[in-house]
Amino acid sequence: MKLLLLLVVMGTVSAKVQDLSGKMFIFPQKTNTAHVRLNPNTQGYNALTVCHRSFTDINKDHALFSLATPSHANSFLIFWQDRNQELQPHVRDAKVAYGGWDYKLNTWHSICTTWDSVSGLVQVWFDGTPSIRKFATSGGAINGTVIAILGQEQDSHGGGFDINQSFVGMITDVHMWDYTLSSCEIHEYMEEMHYPSGNVLNWSALDFEITGNVQIENKIQICR
Ligand SMILES: *[C@@H]1O[C@H](CO)[C@@H](O)[C@H](O)[C@H]1NC(C)=O
Ligand SMILES: *[C@@H]1O[C@H](CO)[C@@H](O)[C@H](O)[C@H]1NC(C)=O
Ligand SMILES: *[C@@H]1O[C@H](CO)[C@@H](O)[C@H](O)[C@H]1NC(C)=O
Ligand SMILES: [Ca+2]
């Protein structure tokens, strides 16, 4: 009976699915612990699109999205590398680098990244502008148990956080699809028009767990 009660209590804690429409996560401190773990609806991806909007004032390296599997800590990582001013997507530990963006501090940036295992090509969209398509890795899916994290960069499956790669600021509208969105759909995301919600991670029905100081607030405050 006690065990059953415990299981019920634990069940309600872990099954924390929330509609975060109009809300954002705030990462208010530089730490090597605070993060949000996102629980995907499905595992095993032959293609991916990940989109998010973020706002920061750190002029240092930081991770925007970190997805690890047991075989690849950087199974799908979106990383800002400050020294070279590059947005660096990693897929199954293969890195591609994109420079030339106006990654202004204290500004919202909408970023979408696509990849598929047939062509092996990655493409980034940054505030409405598409990058060229670059080769990362082909012929293999992202498989194994997925751990997707905001706020920290995983050097191991679910851990290995480095304070100097942590994120400080706000993140919102995180969606992940197990297919590549069309350029029109990505345009709709960029313009905050009606766009398809993620079938793997859905900001409107997000299954997540917060560790440490991460707060949820409304994205827009209307002044009258
Ligand atoms: C994952 O994919 C690799 C090749 O990409 C394959 O060797 C391995 O068997 C797969 N593992 C699972 C659990 O599907
Ligand atoms: C983080 O960066 C600071 C300042 O550059 C440095 O002193 C510190 O050793 C770094 N910490 C780690 C864990 O790399
Ligand atoms: C995302 O969540 C919303 C709200 O529950 C739902 O209406 C929508 O169908 C979901 N999208 C997908 C692709 O499951
Ligand atoms: Ca790292």
Image (cartoon, rainbow, N blue to C red):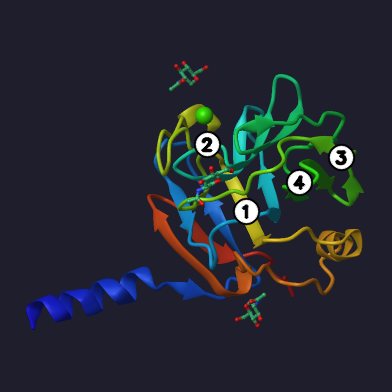
Residue 108 shows in this picture: no
Q: Quadrant of the C terminus?
A: bottom right
Left or right, 61 with reference to 163:
right
Nearer to the camera, 198 or 212: 198
Amino acid at dot 2: Ser
Residue receiving disc 3? 133
Q: Quadrant of residue 119?
A: top right
Which residue sits at x=70%, y=19%?
A: 83
Judging depth in this view, the residue of 214 and 70 nearest the camera is: 70
* Quadrant where the image shows the N terminus: bottom left
Q: Residue under circle 2?
A: 166
- The mark nearer the N terminus, 1 or 3, is 3
Give the number of the mark in front: 1 or 3: 3
Q: What label sits on residue 171 in the rendered view?
A: 1
Using residue 2 as the reference point, say whether residue 68 is left or right of it: right
Some atom of ligand 1 lies within 8 Å of the CB belonging to the residue at label 3: no
Determine which residue is flagged by label 4.
107
Which of pointers 3 and 4 lies earlier in the amino acid sequence? 4
Counting residues from the N terminus, which is met first, the one under dot 2 or under dot 1? 2
The answer to whether marks 1 and 3 mark residues whose Cβ atoms lie closer than 8 Å is no
The answer to whether 90 is drawn above or below residue 182 in the figure is above
- Near mark 3 (Cα within 10 A), the count class, few <14, some 14-19 or many ≥20, is some
In the depicted structure, whether residue 185 falls above or below residue 82: below
Q: Amino acid at mark 3?
A: Arg
Q: Residues within 10 Å of mark 1 (few under 14, many from 20)?
A: many
Tell me which amino acid carries mark 4: Thr
The amino acid pointed to by label 1 is Ile
Label 1 element class: strand
